[in-house]
Image (tube, rainbow, N blue to C red):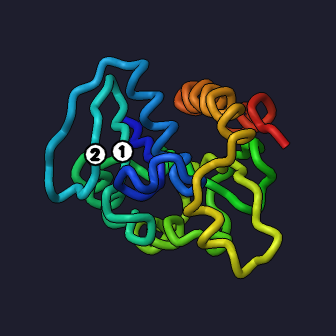
Amino acid sequence: MFLIAGLGNPGDKYKLTRHNIGFLVIDEIAKSLTTSNINNPNFKAIVYKAPNTLLVKPQTFMNLSGESIVSIADYYNIPNENIIIIHDDIDLSYGSVKFKIGGGHGGHNGLKSIDANIDKDYIRVRIGVGKPENKADVANYVLNNFNKEELNNLNDIISHVIKAIEVIKKEPLEKVKSTFTIK
């Protein structure tokens, strides 16, 4: 069983923000699969069950994402090597896609929370959203909507990530990196 979680914040206010790119990927994956909803209030998440896969959108707000991930992973006994976290990354240019296991959180509060709850040895799908000119504006930047130009390319980026995730479930991560990394 795989747990594939997209990070984001709940609510329409955040729907098309850079911080919610993980939610957008999960929404697209769910559209392409036959899923059923799992309603367990202990999960603090929207959870879709598909064959051999749980698609997760934590509803705890970004900073507490790890609470949802650990409760679902523990309940279903999912090992960290089968946990895939999709998140925005301001250290990558817009549209870049990279993959890794472990490493630092780079100041990303969602990753800090997950690391604190399940450790760092899970698969990360890092999607570049660019960064503001002024480092003090990071919070506003990631909580603002994608601009028009970014929105025009968003579907292609999401489609690329979805293809990569399918391969991650079957192949070693090194093969995924060599085939699906976009710099």
Residue 83 seen in the current view: no
Nearer to me, 144 or 130: 144
Give the quadrant of the N terminus: top left
Give the quadrant of the C terminus: top right
As drawn, 127 above or below 130:
above
Residue 15 seen in the current view: yes
Disc 2 element: strand
Give the x, y percent position of residue 137.
69, 75
Q: Are marks 2 and 1 in contact (CB under 8 Å)?
A: yes
As drawn, 75 above or below 156:
below
Residue that carries the numbered disc 1 in the rendered image? 56
Q: Callout 2: few (<14), some (14-19), or many (20+) C-alpha neighbours within 10 Å?
A: some
As drawn, 141 above or below 46:
below
At x 38%, y 64%, the residue is 61
At x 45%, y 48%, the residue is 15
Task: Give the mark nearer the N terminus: 2 vs 1.
Answer: 2
Q: For this view, does 21 lie left or right of residue 153?
A: left
Residue that carries the numbered disc 2 in the rendered image? 46
At x 17%, y 59%, the residue is 42
Give the x, y percent position of residue 118.
42, 65
**Disc 1 marks which amino acid?**
Val
Give the x, y percent position of residue 107.
63, 74
Q: For this view, does 12 lie left or right of residue 167?
A: left
Farthest-out residue, front: 148
As drawn, 120 above or below 94:
below
